[in-house]
Amino acid sequence: MEPRDLLALDEINLSDPAFWELPNPVRDGAFRRLRRERPLAFFEEPDLDPAIAMFIPKGNGYRAVTRHADIVEVSRNPEIYSSAKGATSIQDMPVELLEYFGSMVNTDDPRHALLRRVVSQAFSPRTIKRIEERIETLAGSIIDRVCERGECDFVLDVAARLPLEVICDLMGVSPSDYQTVFDASNVIVNSTNAAVGAGDPEYTPEGTDVLTSLLVKAEELTALVSELAEYRRATPADDVTSSLVNANVDGEALTPAEIASFFILLVVAGNDTARNTMSLGLHALTEYPEQRARWLADPRGVGPTAVEEMVRWCSPVVWMRRTVTRTTQLAGEGLEEGDKVLLYYNSANRDEDVFGDPYDFDVRRSPNPHLGFGAAGPHFCLGAPLARIEIGVMFRQLFERLPDIVSVGEPDRLRSTFINGVKHLSCAFTPTPVSG
């Protein structure tokens, strides 16, 4: 849908949660205007949740990087644009929170490179290829649970289940703990949203202490992974937890807190990207039936480009932050040490200088240099190959077994300025028997 220029330049406020509740065409129009007229716009930082404002001071504002080329430049120069002061928060969080809830996301090289190598073996092409058969099995099992019903909540029953079960399977987490992991990851993501004044009441009800909710759920995951890690020290297996407890960084084993931090990063990041892309992807296919027909006609042939287009279209992570380390120039403007820049991937993925007809959903789009997994650089999403396979496998099986599946109504979106999330999405299909 074509963007609508309803907001004047000075009416655009990316720090206002109300902006993110505007219709997509209005927001797209605002970002188009920023790219053209003010590609490095300055914004005051959002008001913090009162429970968090007691501990974290409001900062001096940030620049919104909205053009594809500028985001690529920032991402390729981590020595100038640092992640160490926080990549997923606008505010400067305490070091303990940065390390615990962000792990390697909130670090720079050489520490970042060392930590990334520890976990990268779980996401190597060879490992991903090896577990692809397991992903096929899990996807089939998830469809079996809903196929006879004719309708379901696509988010809770399908899109959230596959990445959750794959990550838990990789970690060696028992199926009896899946719901605990799912609930905790929702609260942790929402607490990040609430910190910038955009929390969702479904996950953090009114009157709830956001910081307490965050710490309680983090402690639940820490207890779970600590027990699992202790077991894997004595009984190692072919899973990521065994790799973490036996890992060596700078001559030292990972601490229990570092292992817990890795676990939180994997279950939160590993779930959100794929689940939101699948959910918004189904909605896009419903709104663009001709694109759906193209994919249905050749599921395996169109699948790879269709998956990339879904990620571009959905842009599941809206932004990441970097902090300037020295005087530099970006988009023709000067930046100073300590300045904050937010990389708006959703805007880059609609940049007319890069994408032809960027507001059209095209499952055969090629080339498609989207930044849905971040831009090339040390912080490019480590789990991108896994997410691509999960999305591709799930839709191929859906087309084979529930070929008329469509979304019903509008997505119930997560209230967030950081995650392009979906909490619920009704879908309908012709009931079919369980396989086998």
Image (cartoon, rainbow, N blue to C red):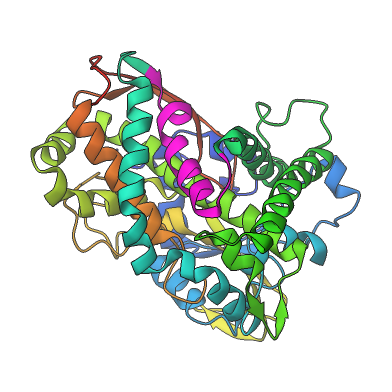
**Residue 26, above or below 172:** above
Question: From the viewer's perspective, is residue 149 above or below residue 309?
Answer: above
Within the image, what quadrant is residue 383 found in? bottom left
Q: Residue at x 19, y 54 (%)?
A: 365
Above or below for 50 versus 86: above
Region of the chain picked out in magenta, as a range: 152-174
Magenta segment: does it hold 281? Answer: no
Q: Residue furthest left?
A: 297
Q: Find out whether residue 156 is within the magenta segment.
A: yes
Res. 91 in view: no
Q: x, y (%) of residue 264?
A: 65, 53
What is the tally of numbered marks visible in this picture? 0
Q: Main secondary structure of the magenta part?
A: helix
Horizontal side of 361 relative to 317 (left or right) equals: left
Residue 342 at what x, y percent from top left?
58, 62
Q: Nearer the viewer, residue 147 or 48?
A: 147
Q: Is residue 433 left or right of residue 280?
A: left
The N terminus is located in which quarter? Answer: top left
- Furthest toward the front, the residue is 235
Work out whether residue 79 or residue 434 is closer to the camera in this orientation and state it. Answer: 434
* Residue 94 place in picture, x, y as percent: 82, 63
Q: Residue at x 72, y 76 (%)?
A: 338
Q: Is residue 52 visible?
A: yes
The residue positioned farthest toward the right in the image shown: 54
Query: 198 or 160: nearer the eye?
Result: 160
Q: Residue at x 26, y 59 (%)?
A: 355
Among the 4 quarters of the image, the one containing residue 102? bottom right
Quadrant for the C terminus, please. Answer: top left
Residue 396: x, y in percent?
22, 40
